Amino acid sequence: MTTAAPAPEASGPRRRRWRRLVLAVVVGLGLLAGSVYVLLPPERAVRLALDRLGPALGLEITFDGDIEYRLRGTPQLVARDVTARMPGEATALLRADRVLLSLPWSTIRSRGEVFEIARVELDSPILHLPALLRWLGTRPPGDGPSPAFTDGVRIRDGVVDADTWRIEGLALDAPSLQADRPVDLRIEGSAIAGAVTAPFRLRMRSDRLAGAKRLDADGTLGLRLPTGRLDTRLHLHAARADDDAMPGLRLSPVRIAGEAHWRARATSLPFAFGLHGSLAYRAGRLELAPVGIAIRGQGPVPTLATGGRIVLDQGLVLALDGRLAHWPDAWPSLPAPLSADGSPLPFALRYTGPSTLDAPLAFRIEHAGARFDGDTRLRAVLQWFDAFDTGSPLPPLRGRLTAGRLELPGAVLEGVQIDFEDGAP
């Protein structure tokens, strides 16, 4: 399941409202720290600010523990055990063990007219994605400039909780974030869905922060399955194609090129791959459609091209049709007359089930008048690959092979129909 972590649903105004939330919190706390430093203890000053700020944002914002702030140099405020939630909801939208806000004096003196924040640091933040989307849906339309984070943003040990999947160990470093300037940041973490873990470490760049139209990413993405691991090094290029009439995030085209390596106990299978298509994300649903995928393999990994749609929601849906460039030499030899035909082999894949690919994977393949219709399970195929040199020459398939004619040693068969059960005819 890929991915860098997915972006939350947001139209242009909603994204601006999220940035304005950050700005309002930062400026409100900064103004209060500067104005009541000599009048009130830090904890009481911050509580007074939050009592006014929370209702304006439609949030209950609280903190526990000591407050630290500094006014010399660049003013700085540190709050611990910070929580933000919608009134009446048990689930917090955001929790953080530590929040550091650094504001230049120009922001404090201008009372927010100058939209500039020196630095933000979050330690162990937990963002509940469904709660964030609910909060965004309650906010009135708004517009306004984005704040400038001149000394950047840092996140450590973060979590994004989407109920059915999550990201853990999230770390982000951005030396600077300014609305009208290019973005260059590094992000890493592990996306987890069931028994599948996808660690990622990426450098991401865009043409600008506000209203970005181009996105590039380079780095590594892996998959950790009970049967083995897939490691990839990839490059991604995408263009924004958001439509105000269709809420959410849309990227088109998305281009990914990379090199991958599947490793299991006795298996080492390198291959190259490419992807081209359109991506849409809305309300927890990720869809690639239309999408084209190409694989250049070696050994038992075939060279192929396929296209169709991929949907990741509560489960996974695959609907792909394509062609094998040729029958791999490492696969069991085809009987005549199939072996004499070197043309590409049309195939189709269909899957509906858990994102762990534990359900049967249906497929069809045709060649020189012969056809196989059946299914298999990914785990069984990977185990077959792992024992490729010593195990059964036939993959673990269930289904039916039909052929007009097959030539075997000492026999010629016509009108052939063979049923397979777990690889055995």
Image (cartoon, rainbow, N blue to C red):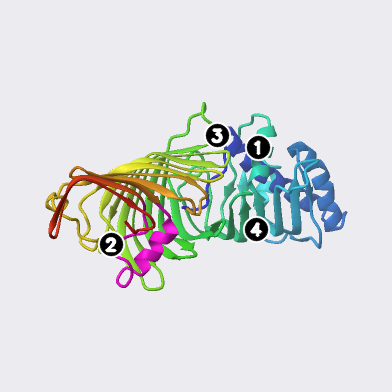
Amino acid under disc 4 = Leu
Task: Find out whether the residues at labels 2 and 1 contact each other: C-beta distance under 8 Å.
Answer: no
Q: Which mark is residue 300?
A: 2
Q: Position of residue 276 (x, y in %)?
A: 34, 44
Work out whether residue 286 can be spotted. yes
> Which three-letter amino acid code belongs to the residue tagged 3?
Gly
Please provide the residue range marked out in magenta: 376-398
Circle 4 sits on which residue? 122
Badge 3 or badge 1: first in the primary sequence: 3
> Upstream in the sequence, badge 4 or badge 3?
3
Rendering quarter of residue 68: bottom right
Pair 4/1: label in front: 1
Of the two numbered discs 2 and 1 on the same chain, state the one appearing first in sequence.
Answer: 1
Please tell me how crowded label 1 is: few (under 14), some (14-19), or many (20+) other residues with Cα within 10 Å.
some
Tell me, yes or no, if residue 220 can be seen here.
no
Residue 294, percent from left and from top: 29, 49
Q: Which numbered mark, 2 or 1, is in the foreground of this view?
A: 2
Which label is found at residue 136?
A: 1
Label 4 or label 1, whichever comes before in sequence order: 4
Q: Secondary structure at mark 3?
A: helix
Q: Residues within 10 Å of mark 2 (few under 14, many from 20)?
A: some
Report, in whole angstroms, how far the alpha carbon at label 3 lies from the one at label 2: 47 Å
Where in the figure is residue 362, as x and y percent of width and height? 39, 46
Residue at point 82% right, 55% down?
37
Q: Is residue 114 above or below residue 334?
A: above
Q: CA distance from mark 4 to mark 3?
A: 25 Å
Q: Which residue is mark 3?
A: 12
Is 299 left, or right, of 255 in this rendering?
left
User: Label 3 neighbourhood size at 10 Å, few (<14), some (14-19), many (20+)?
Assistant: some
Q: Secondary structure at mark 1?
A: helix
